[in-house]
Amino acid sequence: MRGRKPTPTPLKILHGNPGKRPLPTDEPQPRQGDVTCPEHLDEEAKKEWARMSAELEPLGLLTVVDRAALAAYCQLYSQSIALGDLVKKLGAALFDNSTTPPTPYPNPFIAALNRTLKTMHAFISEFGLSPASRTRIHVAPQKKIGIMQRDRTA
């Protein structure tokens, strides 16, 4: 499929339907409910799951079919912390001690960290959580917005 990815309807609603186009009525409606944290996540990823799910569920952006995507994001988050710690510990350059004098080379964990952060950003944008997208979200405090209760006239 060519062109930009379509914006999910819940995000259009949260943004106030900026294009003012009619919202789709035939879009799949994933079931909302208790989306539990997968057991296979490590402790840091589970903490991120708790933090993110508490923010996404009230907005209607976390459904039972989103579990794997959020789990992948949380595992990437945990991985980024571990890689960041390695970079702090080892520094930006490592040294090949088999040569005299030792030859510096870039720390490969920096490249791995950058790839992890780039992939995390892709997941963040899927959930509409980048700083740019947050500035466009306007939620009425008295109205709970969810996929099943959305206002089709917005």
Image: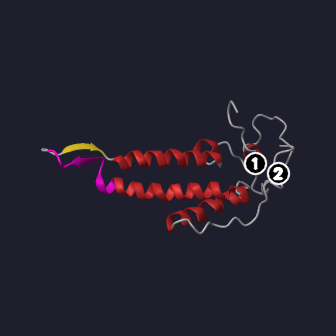
116 inside magenta stretch: no
**Which x, y percent locates residue 39?**
59, 69
Secondary element at image label 1: helix
Q: Tell me the distance, in whole angstroms, between the alpha carbons under discs 2 and 1.
A: 8 Å
The reply to whether residue 130 is in sight is no
- Residue that carries the numbered disc 1 in the rendered image: 10
In this view, the residue in front, 10 or 77, is 77
Q: Which mark is residue 28?
A: none
Classify residue 90 as left or right of residue 3.
Answer: left
Give x and y (percent) for residue 35: 70, 64
Picture quarter with the C terminus? top right
Is the C-beta separation of discs 2 and 1 under 8 Å?
A: yes
Specify start and end residues of the magenta stretch as a single range. Answer: 88-99
Tell me if residue 97 comes above or below residue 45 in the rendering: above
**23 sits left or right of 75 in the view:** right
Mark 2 nearby-residue class (10 Å; few <14, some 14–19, many ≥20):
some
Q: Residue 15, relative to residue 73: is it above or below?
A: above
Mark 2 residue element? loop
Dot 2 or dot 1, earlier in sequence: 1
Seen in the picture, residue 34 relative to 132 is either above or below; the reply is below
User: Would residue 152 appear left or right of 141 to someone viewing this image?
Assistant: right
Residue 55, quarter of the rendered image: bottom right
Q: Quadrant of residue 65?
A: bottom right
Q: Residue at x 72, y 67 (%)?
A: 34
Q: Where residue 74 sits: x, y (%)?
A: 56, 58
Which mark is on residue 150?
Answer: 2
Where does the N terminus fall, quadrant-wise? top right
Give the colour scheme of this rendering.
secondary structure
